[in-house]
Amino acid sequence: MVEEFKNLLSDGKIGSLDIRNRIVMPPMVSLLSGVSGEVTDRLIDYYAERAKGGTGLIIVEATGIDYPESRGFATELMIDNDRYVPRLSELTKSVHNHGAKIFVQLHHAGRETTPRETEGKQPVCASEVEDRFLGITPRKLETEEVEDLVDKFVQGAVRAEQARFDGVELHGGHGYLIGQFISSRTNKRDDKYGGDIKDRLTFPKEIISGIRDELGEDYPIDFRLSADEFVEEGHGIEESKKVAKELEKAGVDVLHITAGIYESLQTTVEPMRYEEGWRTHLAEQIKEVVDIPVITVGVIREPEMADQLIEDGVADFVAIGRGQIADPFFAKKAAEGRTEDINKCISCNTGCIGEMFNNKAISCTVNPEVGREKEFNELGKAENRKDVLVIGGGPGGMEAAKYAAERGHNVSLYEKDEELGGQMKIGRASCRE
């Protein structure tokens, strides 16, 4: 381990679970699962590559607890039936084989979905409040339906434990169903699940209590919270501090502090213009009021920044999401002092968030191997080595030349300009202005 990143690469702990470093891969929908939400070989290869790359904890993407009503995405991963457990077990085994720990995120989209994903059923919510991003007016859940969903979340956690996940994350952020109950903007109920902030927390508290009853006090529970929804009448950091303290009392082991909902999506998956680490202050303020570990997330691109956040006490763990899509070996390269070799995310949101909303499997403009890890790992040397001419020295041409050379071909790269880079030169010039 290099001394430069001694904080980031130090051992971490969530509850009784030991984690090899402070780097977390947060949940990001990949759409690599099967049409019914089953684990596929491509999904296993995708996560195994990040585990091999040295990350400490992988939190598997949004995983539905009630097909099809909970689904927010085409081919969303599912955990609402025992038939999913065998393949989920293969996923956890593949990650454990490379020394990483693995959680799964239990998810219900609530109103942040469309009838296309829910197979014609009207999306649901704590109250009948329109989602202006999707143009959806949801149906209010009846009290008995909410109670039934509590059990479905709990049973999802039970299956997760059976599949050897090291813990579960409850998705209470980004405006999904649990978050819809927490926020006064979307919770106008007058039953036991509505009212002041403590009453609006009844739904997640019952889920946490149910998981504890089934799996005991030592099974790690993570809670993802949008500490600021960044919308008018949405909750902000001061109310989130109260929420965090209540969740700690309820038995949560770690808080994963994020931000935004679909109507403020640019604060959840930031485009290029956002400053690195701009919302880490949210995690810092939550950490000041709780004694359990806190994970910070949000456009953290550099290991230097991540290490400094740990050293400064901003958070206990740093989630690097798109950065580990761009380079699955982010953690390993940092540990070896090879920071210049890290293939950096450029926050273009094209192959990750962009493909997700187009119902396409994940890809990446700076990493062609995403979702095709096994295919690229098995390329090997070419049997028939050839003279290869690549015309055009932009990013695509240079990448093609690189792979051809690695396979043993004799490569010539031709570019009409005096300097390589193509459109990247335009982007670089824009950044300097």
Image (cartoon, rainbow, N blue to C red):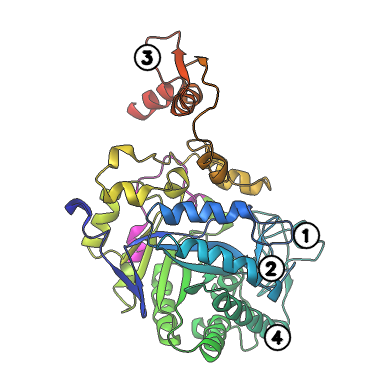
Q: Secondary structure at mark 1?
A: loop
- Residue 43, horizontal then vertical, whole percent: 59, 54
Image depth: mark 3 or mark 2 in front: 3
Where 254 sits versus 136, above or below? below
Mark 3 to mark 1 CA distance (whole Å): 50 Å
Image depth: mark 3 or mark 1 in front: 3
Question: 10 Å neighbourhood of mark 4: few (<14), some, or many (≥20)?
Answer: some
Q: Secondary structure at mark 3?
A: loop
The residue that disc 1 covers is: 115
Where 415 sits versus 187, above or below? above
What amino acid does circle 4 point to?
A: Thr
Q: Earlier in the sequence, mark 4 or mark 1?
A: 1
Mark 1 to mark 2 CA distance (whole Å): 11 Å
Question: 10 Å neighbourhood of mark 3: few (<14), some, or many (≥20)?
Answer: few
Question: 10 Å neighbourhood of mark 1: few (<14), some, or many (≥20)?
Answer: some
* Marks 4 and 1 in Cβ contact (< 8 Å): no
Q: Secondary structure at mark 4?
A: helix
The residue that disc 3 covers is: 419
Mark 4 to mark 2 CA distance (whole Å): 17 Å
First to last magenta residue range: 266-283
- Majority SS type along the magenta span: loop
What amino acid does circle 2 point to?
A: Ser
- Residue 378, horizontal then vertical, whole percent: 53, 41
Q: Is 184 situated left or right of 405 in this image? A: right
